[in-house]
Image (spheres, rainbow, N blue to C red):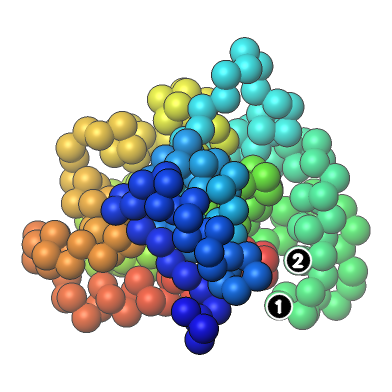
Amino acid sequence: MDRADILKVDFKRTTLEERGAMIKRYGPWRCRMLAEKVETHEEFHLARNQGFLYFQGYFFRKPEIMTAHEIPANRINYLRMLQAVSRAELDLREVENVLKSEASLCYRLLRYMNSAVFGFGSEIHSVRHALSLIGEREIRRWVRLVAAVGAGQQKSSELVLCALTRARFCELLAPKVQHGDSDLFFLGLLSLMDVILEMPMASVLEKVSVDHETKAVPLGSINHLRPLYQLMLAQESGAWEQSAGLVQQLHLSESGVAESYLASDAVDPRRQ
């Protein structure tokens, strides 16, 4: 203990009294305390109130549903953004109007378009001009990214990073699996939107225009996208036996899937 900087405590194998005694004995002046296997929001609040500083577990990936009757206006805007870029026919005027409802997003878009990534000769000053230049695919992808990051501002940064990692992983596997017209990037992102928006998944899907196959998977239905969705979750949780079976079912290589997951895990929302 004299050499330790962080003391990790298994939340499942200790009692409230045992954890309290360890915190009293070792923290906070000797060791920073980490609560491991925190699975619910109640356990998270309990651990934080006890004096733990760090937390590991899946509590932040489970929705903490809001009890208020109305959804805050800013969250409605993020849903409208997702809806606007999920239509089969993209309406640039609708996307422009939704983006203009969030001044910070207008600023981000113009900063993005005027960056060295594009190298345009003249500066871009309007949202409409920016949207007309970057193309439909990039518009959909960019809006989904900033909507996820924006909606998750009050949540754990790890949650947003996890959503973007899932989205990128599915996107990287898209050329190797059959998915029809479904947008696999959006499938991965959608998998955590109930947690990010603090709404039941069914309510999120009611408000977002998306193809039937993509909509069915987060609700637990079985279709041709389900194995990829399960593979995404298996890779994330380190369920290697399950992952190996799904890799075989999808006719992929284990090394290729591992490389794709490592590449997707490098996504950092702060760079967007």
- Image quadrant holding the C terminus, namely bottom right
For label 1, the residue is 117
Looking at the image, which is closer to me, 56 or 157?
Answer: 56
Name the quadrant containing residue 251. bottom left
Q: Does dot 1 land on a helix, a strand or a loop?
A: loop
Q: Which mark is residue 112?
A: 2
Q: Is residue 41 left or right of residue 112?
A: left
Looking at the image, which is closer to me, 250 or 52?
Answer: 52
Residue drawn at (82%, 65%) of the image: 111
Looking at the image, which is closer to me, 165 or 43?
Answer: 43
Q: Do callouts 2 and 1 mark residues in contact (Cβ within 8 Å)?
A: yes
Q: Residue furthest top?
A: 69
User: x, y percentage for residue 267?
Assistant: 53, 70
- Please indicate, yes or no, whether residue 90 appears anywhere in the rendered image: no
Residue drawn at (65%, 70%) of the image: 29
The residue type indicated by label 1 comes to Val
- Please indicate, yes or no, whether residue 81 appears anywhere in the rendered image: yes
Q: Is residue 31 left or right of residue 120?
A: left
